[in-house]
Image (cartoon, grey):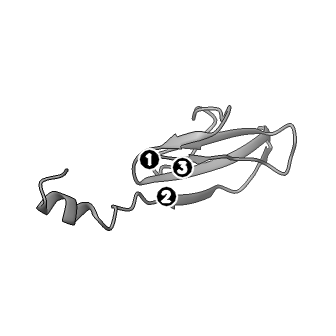
């Protein structure tokens, strides 16, 4: 797993995020601490200070990479 932390340059802003690649809205979950990702995930977030002060949406995709030894372990019956 990987932990992803979000932060805003505006201290009092509320960060809203999604984990499915969709655009976050005012009804998206409020960020309260590191997100633990166990699979390939697209995180998108925005910071809201008020209804008139909304940041641009930022995002990134975090890929879960297979172990380079996974195929070998499977061939050996070790997986």
Numbered label attached to residue 23 = 3
Numbered label attached to residue 46 = none
Numbered label attached to residue 62 = 2
Residue 37 rendering spot, x and y as whole percentages: 48, 45
Secondary structure beneath label 1: loop
Residue at 42% in and 45% down: 38
Placement of 64 over or under 39, stated as above or below: below
Q: Residues within 10 Å of mark 2 (few under 14, many from 20)?
A: some
Residue 71 rendering spot, x and y as whole percentages: 20, 64
Discs 2, 1 touching: Cβ within 8 Å: no
Discs 1, 3 touching: Cβ within 8 Å: no
Left or right of 39: which side holds 61? right
| Marks 2 and 1, how far apart at CA | 11 Å
- Please tell me in which quadrant of the rendered image residue 67 appears: bottom left
- Residue furthest to the right in view is 11
Which residue is disc 1 drawn over? 20
Q: Nearer the viewer, mark 2 or mark 1?
A: 2
Q: Nearer the viewer, mark 1 or mark 3?
A: 1
- Pick whichever, 12 or 4, lies toward us: 4
Residue 8 rendering spot, x and y as whole percentages: 79, 48
Residue at 65% in and 32% down: 30
Left or right of 31: which side holds 9? right
Secondary structure beneath label 2: strand
Q: Nearer the viewer, mark 3 or mark 2?
A: 2
Instruction: Specify which label sits upstream in the sequence, 2 or 1.
Output: 1
């Amino acid at each position: 797993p990987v932990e992803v932390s979000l932060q805003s340059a505006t201290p009092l802003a509320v960060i809203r995020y999604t984990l499915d690649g969709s655009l976050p809205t005012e009804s998206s979950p409020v960020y309260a601490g590191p997100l633990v990702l166990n699979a390939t995930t697209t995180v998108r977030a925005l910071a809201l200070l008020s209804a008139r002060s909304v940041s641009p949406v930022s995002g990134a995709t975090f890929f879960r990479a297979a172990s380079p030894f996974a195929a070998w372990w499977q061939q050996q019956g070790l997986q």
